[in-house]
């Protein structure tokens, strides 16, 4: 089965350096697939916090994960530093589709590529809430 190539480093607008941990390796000696999802969640939420868009106790909207996925292309293992690239692949009325690339530090070829979709909802009613113009501007920096 063939698939399109994973996106190159140049496709991403924001970068985070992460470290693998001893506990990340599985029985087969590589980072377990569940760890990739933890990295996705960490990088997206760190970016949102840095932009003032995620306030755990504030009155603003919250992002609910409604879809995620990952394509694995190469193994990673402890001790190996990684870099995770982030971009906004699509922007809807109340949703953002993030694309994330996981790269071994120094590699130009992604070891994995993920999708992560947030739908922004009212904190109390949990009904979708349109993204404000300010938020749309911030997300556009990731496009």
Image (cartoon, helix red, strand yellow):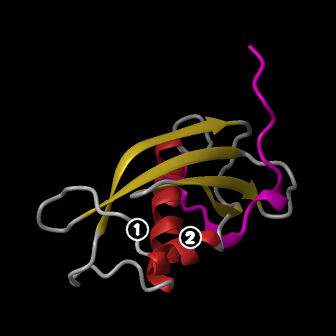
Q: Which residue is mark 1?
A: 131
SS at mark 2?
A: helix
Q: Is residue 28 above or below residue 115?
A: above
When the figure is inspected, residue 36 is found, relative to residue 17, above or below; the finding is above
Disc ID at residue 16: none
Secondary element at tag 1 = loop
Q: Position of residue 83 (x, y in %)?
A: 70, 65
Magenta residues, start to end: 1-25
Q: Residue shown at 78%/30% (left/top)?
A: 4
Check whether the beta carbons of the residues at disc 1 and disc 2 lie within 8 A of each other. yes
Residue 78 found in image quarter? bottom right
Q: Few, some or many C-alpha atoms within 10 Å of disc 1 (few <14, some 14-19, many ≥20)?
A: many
Does 30 sit left or right of 8 as displayed? left
Front residue (pair 31, 72)? 72
Q: Residue furthest left?
A: 124
Crowding at label 2, few (<14), some or many (≥20) Cα neighbours within 10 Å? many
Q: Is residue 92 left or right of residue 140?
A: left
The residue drawn where x is 72% and y is 36% is 73
Q: Which disc number belongs to residue 139?
A: 2
User: Is 4 included in the stretch rendered in magenta?
Assistant: yes
């Amino acid at each position: 089965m063939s698939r399109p190539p994973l996106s190159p480093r140049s496709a991403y607008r924001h970068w985070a350096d992460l470290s693998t941990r001893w506990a990340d390796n599985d029985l087969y000696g590589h980072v377990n697939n569940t760890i990739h999802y933890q990295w996705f969640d960490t990088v997206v939420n760190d970016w949102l916090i840095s932009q003032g868009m995620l306030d755990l106790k504030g009155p603003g909207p919250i992002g609910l994960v409604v879809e995620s996925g990952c394509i694995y292309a190469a193994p990673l293992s402890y001790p190996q530093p990684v870099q995770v690239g982030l971009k906004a692949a699509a922007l809807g009325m109340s949703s953002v589709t993030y694309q994330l690339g996981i790269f071994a530090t120094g590699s130009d070829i992604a070891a994995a590529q993920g999708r992560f979709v947030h739908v922004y909802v009212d904190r109390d009613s949990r009904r979708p809430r349109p993204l404000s113009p300010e938020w749309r501007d911030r997300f556009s920096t990731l496009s």
